[in-house]
Amino acid sequence: MLALGLWAAGLWALPLWGEVWFSDLDLTAYDRLLFRAEADSPGFGPYRTLFAADLADGRLEQLTFFPESISLVAGVLQVQNRFGLFRTDSALANPVPVAGLPGFVTGGQVESGKLDLVASSPDGRWLLRLSPTSAAYGELLLYDMKGGPASVASSGVELSLKAIPVLWSPDSDFFLYSKRDSLYYYSVSQLREKRVLEESYRLLGKGTVRNVRWGPASPLADGSALYYATGSLVYRLSPRELFTRSLYGGFLPIGRLAGKLPFEMDPNFDQFWVSPDGSQLLVSKAGRNLFLVPLSPEDYSGPSLSLPYLYLPGSGSVRRVLWLRTGKILVLADYRQNGAGSTGVYLLSAADLRTLPSFRRIPEEGVLDLALSADESSVAVMRADGLTVHDSGSWQKRQTLAHPRPLHVAWTPAGELIVAGAWLTELWNPASGVKRLLCLSQPGDSSFSEDERSILTAVQGAYYRRPAAAGAAAGSAGGSAVVWSATGSAALRQPRSQSAAFRVYLEDSPDRLLRNRLMARDLRLYGTRELLAKPAAAYESFPAEEEPSDPVLFAHGSRIRRREVALVFDVVDSVEGLASILEVLEEYGIRATFFVNGDALRRYPDAIREIAGAGHEVGSLFFTHFNMTDARFTVDAEFIKRGLARAEDEYHAVTAQELALLWHAP
């Protein structure tokens, strides 16, 4: 058992995540203000964003775009971060906010914590996002990028911090979504024709979007089909029969049986991938077990098969699967080692089960992501210092690109690579070696030029310049040159805070999500106003008095002093899910408290070493798990001392560290 508790703030407490602060004000004589905003992001850490504001009309423009998430949608680059959602022009440059969606420059709040990710249709016209209505549920909103109000596709959908629970069809005509352990479809053509069915008539079956994948119609046919794994059965559905079969789902099976799994599918922990020809599945069971399974409804008789199998470490999980038309499979797996995350790349050279293929590890270290080119001839390998491109057949290294801290990589249909990094987002042609700047991800030191006609910023030792005029990216849909351009050298000026009409300054903010706020003093009208005024974050008020507490059974600490909680985990007799817990804690920069007992130390010494290596506080849960109130035991002071001492000695023997001076009864 691995249990979670929320304790008093006396242990290691969670900080408030998502605080934003402004800095580096520079004001021109014509009242255009340059400033930076800094925000924390789980998984990425703090980053800066450069803005320009016109004090006369209040217009706000975002100048840099940190790529917390990217996707290539219908030939344009889509970038999402906590300041909004942006799309580029046809030249993949000059991102602008997506109209109709909330964003910082249009008056919205800066998102805190994990992003509410979106799902765009393959043709780019439609976009889905979950709008929270409570701490756990939200409305699934459908936006038409051609204009018009958002449509509510469904209500009461569970919020997810990893991905929005939807799957678009390849032709963008409909999407699947899940809620309350059930799968539904929604047709955008029915929406346009104003004949959307009531949700109960759009039910496909039990499960989540992890139960479904798109694949080929059949090993011998063109087109796409939906593969639906439920229990130990896998069905293949044609998009044309999807709507009809959902209407009669109460007494007709959904789709045609395509094959069977050797175990039951659990969408909470399992997932699968379909081979390019639709004849096989790669199944991940409980995160760490990978099986290659043939797809056939006939398994009662026939030859016995030795299936390829990959057994990952207990902390392992699959991050990326690339399945080539040649049958070759590449798997990028995550696992934890020595208190930190690590990765491994595994290759199944041929998926022909008659040849008894097996997975082997490729000697590639520090791999953060893999991307397969559209023609499947090349694989891009992303690391912390850049990219390498390998031949997908021989795995020979072809090209190398140095890039400061790349975060995402994506191939274009033309065989070029989009490299979105913490400082720059570039387009690189591996064949020619030519690269060009698409946008700046974040600025360094910045200012207006002395003549106030340009904006200058220093990024990783290089200087970049762009026009200072408002709307410099406007009208770039035809593929104009990027607004930012490299300049050999530049002299940043001393920041200025006053013009003939305004004086700008920063002051502390009462809003808990903003550390400070921008203020503008109008020197002509003798008034002061807050720039970027946003709706203040609303919190529940503190209780007037403490709740009655049980002197014997501790449940929680004070709830009237600070808005803090402490995460406490009891490691008793299982470490299932521990790797995910450690990953999330690392992502948010949280130091938690773990209580471990002797049983866990003896059964899972390597897992306990990972907890200690990650720097978390570790207390004692006694030397074994038992009921201390059981009348068969005499629990006196000497018994407690000896039990705690034994647990301390076992912990030191496993980790070479000491337990914290904290313990609680099992």
Image (tube, helix red, strand yellow):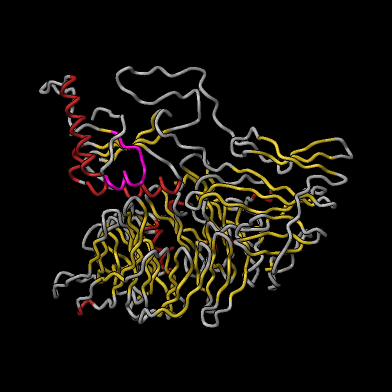
Picture layout, residue 8 above or below residue 80: above
Residue 397 in view of the camera: yes
Q: Is residue 656 magenta?
A: no
Residue 254 in view of the camera: no
- Residue at left 44%, top 46%? 158
- Residue at left 25%, top 33%? 621
Nearest the viewer among 457 and 632 is 457
Q: Quadrant of residue 312?
A: bottom left
- Say how many tags the image has: 0
Nearest the viewer among 15 and 486 is 486
Q: Could you tell me residue 482's position as x and y percent?
A: 68, 69
Task: State which region is magenta.
Answer: 608-619
Kindly give the residue lying farthest to the left in the view shown: 632
Q: Could you tell me residue 19's position as x and y percent?
A: 57, 41
Q: Quadrant of the N terminus?
A: top left
- Residue at left 64%, top 68%? 93
Q: Could you tell me residue 153's position as x and y percent?
A: 52, 53
Q: Could you tell me residue 206's position as x and y percent?
A: 34, 53
**Left or right of 602, for residue 439:** right
- Residue at left 74%, top 67%? 475
Picture layout, residue 96 above or below residue 413: above
